[in-house]
Amino acid sequence: MFVELKLAEGSLIKGMDIEFVDKIDDRKKWCQLKSGPNTINSEDVNPLLKKFSTVANLARTNQISLNNTDLILGVLYGSREELSQHYRKIDERHPVIVGVDFWYRITGFPNFYNKLVIALDKMILSLDTTEFFEKGYTELAVEIKASELFNFE
């Protein structure tokens, strides 16, 4: 989506999802994207930190000006207060940018995130899902009846 909307470019660096110019500090950012504030576990922390270290070392080797604050973990929704301890550990070395702040940095519009959430809420609440769920539970019922795991006699 970010690439399609020309807000970012797909990253050519292994382990990074997108690259974009931060609208707040006007510096290029290399970003690993995560969906929400609780979407990683303890086993994800060291591999993510290793990816960031690898990118930093590659930049030094190629004499690219790069700060630790240029390698970020972007979290699409939530707030800093909601970040799990795993994100907080990463944030000690590289910024974890969340929700409102992330969307502001990538779009340049401070209210973008809030307007996006409102628009998505309206859209979701207006969807007619009757046929979708009816089809789903009908197919599931057929599958259960055909399954050898259940005996309905």
Image (cartoon, rainbow, N blue to C red):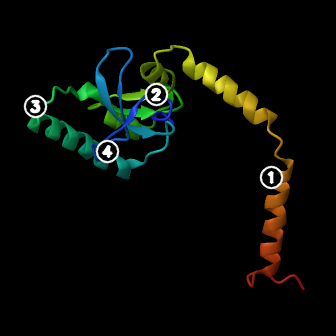
Q: Is residue 132 above or below residue 97?
A: below
Mark 4 closeness class: few <14, some 14–19, many ≥20 residues within 10 Å: some
The residue pinned by badge 4 equals 48
Q: CA distance from mark 2 to mark 4?
A: 16 Å
Marking on residue 63: 3
**Horizontally, is 83 left or right of 22 in the view?**
right
Residue at image point 36% right, 20% down: 22
Q: Is residue 144 above or below residue 70?
A: below
Image coordinates for residue 133, horizontal then vertical, percent: 81, 54
Amino acid on which the number 2 mark rests in the picture: Val
Dot placed on the residue nearer the N-terminal end, 3 or 2: 3
Dot placed on the residue nearer the N-terminal end, 3 or 4: 4
Marking on residue 132: 1
Q: For the residue labelled by badge 1, is the local secondary structure a helix, a strand or a loop?
A: helix
Residue at image point 83% right, 42% down: 128
Marking on residue 98: 2
Q: CA distance from mark 3 to mark 4?
A: 23 Å
Closer to us: 151 or 73: 73
**Horizontally, is 134 left or right of 122 in the view?**
right
Amino acid on which the number 1 mark rests in the picture: Phe
Image coordinates for residue 61, horizontal then vertical, percent: 9, 38
Marking on residue 109: none
